Image (cartoon, rainbow, N blue to C red):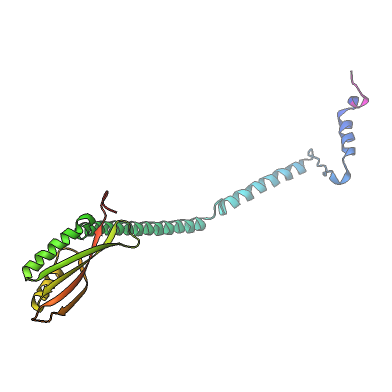
């Protein structure tokens, strides 16, 4: 049994009652679909809209036209070539750095002396050169100074006094110059003695040394 008089209203009257509640400015124009001409027009409009959409999709597909896609592909190829060139350059630099590191390690191993044996090694070579040239070695001393920026390398300054004439001193310096060690003559002072051609010579040498694991700091 209906609860109110509104439930008993027939369907067309109920639709009219609902439409009356909608403001006039919000109402859509009513279309009489039962008119064959209007139905045909609606169908033709839908078909026309579909054809237009298909034409837009064919002439300018999503993502751009064929020319746009070709330009994008060319840009991607160019970028890829640039990245490949940058990668090859980086690999070449890495190879050079590795080669320089290996050469540096070889240089250190060949020419740098261990600190704990450097002084005795150099003194032994100086004594040998002195015997070969006939000069007379006297007192010697040394000091090791750190090299700024390095924790494993130092510079040993060896100072020695000798007696020799000009000819023997020249031979002695030539022998040191051909030494397999990395010796640097920092300074050399020579003063003649009161009698004869004998010179008092003070020679200062620089030798680069390296610290070994567990060695003296």
Task: Using the rendered view, name the quadrant where residue 92 is placed.
Answer: bottom left
Image location of residue 6, percent across then percent down = 91, 27
Question: In which quadrant is the N terminus drawn?
Answer: top right
Q: Is residue 215 left or right of residue 22?
A: left
Image point 84% across, 44% down: which residue? Answer: 26
Measuring 12% from the left and 81% from the top, which residue is drawn there? 194
Query: Horizontal placement of 165 versus 206: left or right?
Result: left
Q: Eyeballing the image, is 194 above or below 145?
A: below
Kindly report the secondary structure that dominates the magenta region of the rendered protein.
loop
The quadrant of the image that shows the C terminus is bottom left
Indicate whether residue 2 is drawn in magenta.
Answer: yes
Which quadrant of the figure has residue 127? Answer: bottom left
- Residue 160 higher or lower than 112, as above or below: below
For the point 40% across and 57% down, the residue is 83
> 93 or 184: nearer the eye?
184
In the orientation shown, which residue stands out farthest toward the right?
5
Residue 67 place in picture, x, y as percent: 50, 58
Q: Which of 127 and 185 is in front in this view?
A: 127
Residue 200 drawn at (x, y percent): 15, 76
Indicate the quadrant where residue 191 lies.
Answer: bottom left
Q: Residue at x 11, y 71 (%)?
A: 172
Give the camera-side residue of 204 and 2. Answer: 204
Q: Which residue lies furthest to the top in this view?
A: 1
Tell me where the magenta segment starts and ends, as one range: 1-6
Q: Is residue 37 above or below residue 201?
A: above
């Amino acid at each position: 049994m209906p609860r109110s008089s509104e439930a008993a209203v027939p369907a067309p009257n109920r639709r009219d009652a609902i439409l009356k509640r909608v403001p006039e400015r919000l109402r859509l124009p009513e279309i009489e679909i039962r008119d064959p001409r209007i139905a045909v027009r609606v169908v033709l409009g839908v078909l026309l809209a579909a054809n237009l959409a298909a034409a837009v999709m064919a002439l300018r597909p999503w993502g751009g036209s064929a020319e746009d896609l070709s330009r994008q592909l060319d840009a991607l190829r160019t970028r890829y070539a640039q990245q490949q060139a940058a990668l090859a350059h980086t690999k070449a630099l890495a190879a050079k750095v590795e080669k320089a590191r290996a050469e540096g390690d070889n240089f250190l191993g060949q020419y740098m002396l261990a600190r704990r044996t450097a002084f005795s090694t150099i003194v032994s070579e100086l004594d040998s050169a002195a015997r070969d040239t006939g000069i007379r070695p006297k007192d010697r001393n040394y000091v090791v100074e750190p090299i700024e920026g390095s924790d494993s390398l130092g510079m040993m300054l060896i100072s020695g006094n000798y007696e020799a004439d000009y000819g023997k001193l020249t031979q002695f310096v030539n022998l040191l110059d051909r030494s397999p060690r990395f010796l640097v003559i920092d300074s050399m002072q020579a003063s003649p003695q009161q009698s004869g051609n004998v010179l008092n010579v003070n020679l200062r040498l620089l030798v680069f040394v390296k610290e070994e694991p567990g060695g003296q700091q």
